Amino acid sequence: MTKLSFIEKNKFEKLFGMKTGFVMDFTDRTFQEFVGDAVGIDIYDEKYNYGSGSKANRLRGFWSEESNYNIGTLLAKLLEYWLDQAQSGEINYDRADENNYQDCTGIVEKIKAENPVENIDAIQANTDDRTFNILAESVRESITKNEPEKALDRLHTFTIKYVRQLCENHQVSYEKETPLHSLFGGYVKKIVKEGLVESTMTERILKSSISVLEAFNGVRNNQSFAHDNQILNYNESILIFNNVSNVIRFLETIEKPKTEEKKETVEEWKDLPF
């Protein structure tokens, strides 16, 4: 659970105007949508029905019920929204608010630093497939509960699905039985050929990950709950999670321009008058 102190909570309450029962300018509907987009949670679930059930009280209930990961993620998004509203003139603020905003940003960084996996938020499905999204959520949840060793098999399944989608994005052919490291090897070869990797060192790091992912196959089969195994210890499980999430975070930087270009093309087609 969160380690937010009374003083820290009070800083967020002042910045977001929560003493009136509101959270900034959110309506019930927009607050529900905002929280859902930020952390994939329905803030109007009964578990967050704290006190009067107002938006402010539901955020307080969220602080009480959720993990550091989810709390830090939502607060970071709310701070981002506050700053956007302040810069656009939608919120009146003074120097005290500016200082409070900086304090709140530091609190969020402290919360995030407590997460044992540096880039766990990179574990996101790269398609709209519902099953894939549920899988990604379950993997992230294992880290919020500080139980990485229990999710190694799901992390492996997630990584296979993630890399398969990357292969499809770049027209890299594969079979259903193609193992993870071979999928990744084909993808790396293609993005190097496409000129998406600028340095020889980056290319070597990515290629070294091929052998790492090959070893991950063995962990999945022999040291996870994929079968009746003695599972891997906590510290090595954290190392594996960090390695995989860091690679995926970097791949996001390669794939993001391609994804945005695809979205722009779709929007252009939507705008056509027929």
Image (cartoon, helix red, strand yellow):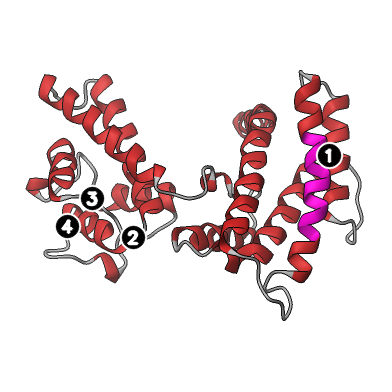
User: Which residue bears the numbered disc 3?
Assistant: 4
User: What amino acid is found at the position of numbered circle 3 in the picture?
Assistant: Leu
Residue plotted at (62% across, 40% down): 246
Mark sitting earlier along the chain (2/4): 4
* Callout 4 secondary element: helix
Disc 1 from disc 4: Cα separation: 47 Å
Q: CA distance from mark 1 to mark 3?
A: 43 Å
Where is residue 70? Give x, y as percent.
39, 53
State the separation of the CA atoms marked 2 and 1: 37 Å
| Rendering coords of residue 1 (x, y %) | 31, 60
Mark 3, other Cα within 10 Å: few <14 / some 14–19 / many ≥20: some
Marks 1 and 4 close (CB-CB < 8 Å): no
Badge 1, how many Cα within 10 Å: few under 14, some, many 20+? many
Q: Amino acid at mark 2?
A: Glu
Amino acid at circle 1: Tyr
The magenta-colored residue range is 206-217
Residue type at mark 4: give it.
Asn
Residue furthest to the bottom: 228
Q: Earlier in the sequence, mark 1 or mark 4?
A: 4
Residue placed most toward the observer, 259 or 181: 181
Residue positioned 44% across, 49% down in the render: 115
Q: Is residue 199 above or below residue 173?
A: above
Q: Which residue is mark 4?
A: 57
Q: Is residue 153 left or right of residue 29?
A: right
Residue that carries the numbered disc 1 in the rendered image: 187
Residue at 88%, 25% (x, y): give it: 193
**Which comes before the other along the chain, label 3 or label 4?**
3
Q: Residues within 10 Å of mark 4 (few under 14, many from 20)?
A: many
